[in-house]
Amino acid sequence: MFIFVLTQINKHEHVMKRLFMFGIMVAMGVLGVSAQGIYDMSVTDGTGRQVPLSGYRGKVLLIVNSATHCGFTPQYKELEALYEKYRTEGLEILDFPCNQFGQQAQGSFQDIHRFCTTTYNIQFPQFEKIDVNGSAESPLYAWLKSRKGPDIKWNFTKFLVGRDGRVIARYEPADEMGRVEADIRLELNPVTSAIMARRSIRKYLDKPVEHEKLEAIVRCGINAPSGSNRQPWIVRVVEDRQLIADVTEVFKQENPEQVKRDPGFKNMFRNAPNLICICSPEGNGGWLDAGLLGGNMLLAAQSMGLGTCCLGGPVRFLKTSERAKFFLERLDIPDGYELHYIIAVGYPDEEPAARPRDASKVKFIR
């Protein structure tokens, strides 16, 4: 079962302002596009026409700087194979010839396009030649490098951009195309895309999550697998921001040194505006089911553009502080159950990079 803790919410939204210190970009007038996104930019096709990249919104993009007389030029064949294989699923390859590396993309756009279509039968869009580094670099590449720098080193460097406009990965020319394809497949599938994109968020906008979205997240959670369909968990969704503020005040008084170490401290739940509290039977009963439930919620929130963080520290505080007892009482947890963990949820105000995962711990038994 699940219950929403509902109160009147003050719907104040604070607009967060960020200062970007890109000296060279400012001089080039690129700062604006860096602070915005890929869909705010346009590129030039072979006829000189401006093509808004907003037309590719919702597509998975593989962006490549190419050359026709390079040792990596045969990659055109592999790129076309990818395009033919995944185009109907939403992949677009955007090709930008560049003559900056060894002068290996000489000739006009028409010369280059004729060579690529005749030799490799490419079908994906090809655009006018550009610079990818230096004072005349394309705003698109300035933006790509601001996400996945440094400067481009050679022809056939590639960037993978997700359906939501995030730069997912950068590949150097010698990287195996199999790795590129694997990442493309993950990004084309909305479920695996959400799994790969999710990060633990510790900075949130001062904006509550809409009740309808919280309801949808909970529905995804309670539809997780449960042994013998016992559904041993209970869920409490906290929308009462005053309740969060009140218990945070107790936390600040009892943990002043910890609060001082965090200059951005707003509340004890990683500053999130909403909480999802997962409870399970006392004595370790139902923990597996509770974990599966939370996993569904984390991914559902990610798919809605929300950030989450799974919290254990606040749970320990709530269980040990007598002055914070009112918070648990407000959750109305039935006898025989205990608060297991809390999911902080809100609109993210950061884009943390993925932390390494140890694939060596995985073995396939064949």
Image: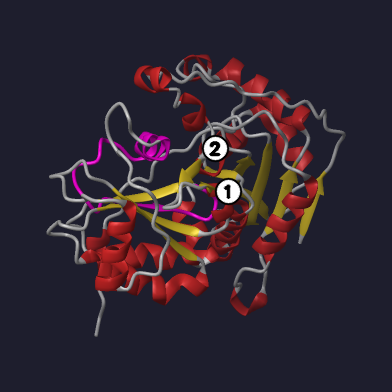
User: Disc 2 residue type?
Assistant: Arg
Residue 34: % across, % down: 47, 31
Q: Who is closer to the viewer here, 41 or 257?
A: 41
Task: Tell me the SS state at disc 2.
Answer: helix
Residue 54, disc? 1
Q: Earlier in the sequence, mark 1 or mark 2?
A: 1
| Residue at the image point whose x is 33% and y is 42% from the top | 130
Give the colour scheme shown: secondary structure
Q: Which residues are magenta?
A: 139-165
The amino acid on which the numbered mark 1 sits, given as a three-letter code, is Ser
Quadrant into which the N terminus falls = bottom right
Q: Is residue 48 left or right of residue 134?
A: right
Residue 315 coordinates in the image, percent (x, y): 58, 39
Q: Which of 175 and 357 lies nearest the eye of the viewer?
A: 175
Tag on residue 175? Answer: none
The quarter holding residue 353 reads: top left
Front residue (pair 218, 289): 218
